[in-house]
Amino acid sequence: MVNPELHFTRAEYAARLAKVRSTMDADGIELLIVTDPSNMAWLTGYDGWSFYVHQCVLLTLDGEPLWYGRRQDANGAVRTVFMADECILSYPDRYVQSFDCRPMDYLSKIIADRGWGKRTIGVEMDNYYFSAAAYQSLRHHLPIFGFGSGTHDDGLHGVEHPARDRRHLSVLVLLAGHLHA
């Protein structure tokens, strides 16, 4: 295990996670998929110039966050995030720029294998780093769960869930304002 040089204390990261989890819980989000590089850095310390390939942080209501990205970028995650090595997950290179197998297909399997397939999931719908193809892949492989936006009126249409009628999920609004907090 590499001992990363963190820009903030572990207590600071714990406070940030608690703040986001509190909002997730209030909004009925059980798993948050964070794809914006600045939000990933704010939550975990991840610092890498690999935003041109699929990567994200998975955050549940408890436990350590998980970093997910291309296998070669996992080396950078090991050196920059506060989490242990087992919290760094990667997809094989054959998923990069492929139309036959997509990184979010691989992520869907990870989510299902961890028993998270029936959770309500929040994603950054209005974000450059989360593509329509990524959304379609997740919906295709995990059709049982509900998706929430966090920045728009997604409203979890067609999903029976307590958060369904909310007009505005605030988790990602909280993340978007993290640099000003």
Image (spheres, rainbow, N blue to C red):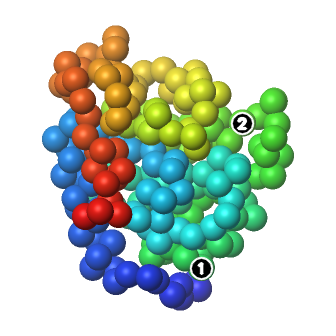
Q: Work out whether residue 52 or residue 3 is closer to the camera in this orientation and state it.
A: 52
Residue 67 against residue 45 in the figure, above or below: above
Identify the image quadrant of residue 63: bottom left
Q: Given the image, on which type of amino acid does mark 1 rest?
A: Arg
Residue at image mark 1: 79
Q: Which residue is drawn at 21% across and 37% down?
A: 27
- Left or right: 154 in relation to 34: left
Q: Which residue is drawn at 33% across and 36% down?
A: 150
Residue at image mark 2: 102
Other residues around mark 1 within 10 Å, as few (<14) / some (14–19) / many (≥20): many
- Left or right: 7 in relation to 101: left
Place of residue 158 in the rendered image (x, y in percent of width and height, measured from the top left): 34, 11
Residue 149 seen from this side: yes
Q: Which of disc 2 and disc 1 is earlier in sequence?
A: 1
Place of residue 95 in the rendered image (x, y in percent of width and height, measured from the top left): 77, 43
Disc assigned to residue 110: none
- Left or right: 33 in relation to 51: left
Element marked by disc 1: helix
Q: Residue at x 35, y 28 (%)?
A: 152
Residue 45 against residue 62 in the figure, above or below: below
Q: Given the image, on which type of amino acid does mark 2 rest?
A: Arg
Place of residue 40 in the rendered image (x, y in percent of width and height, measured from the top left): 47, 59
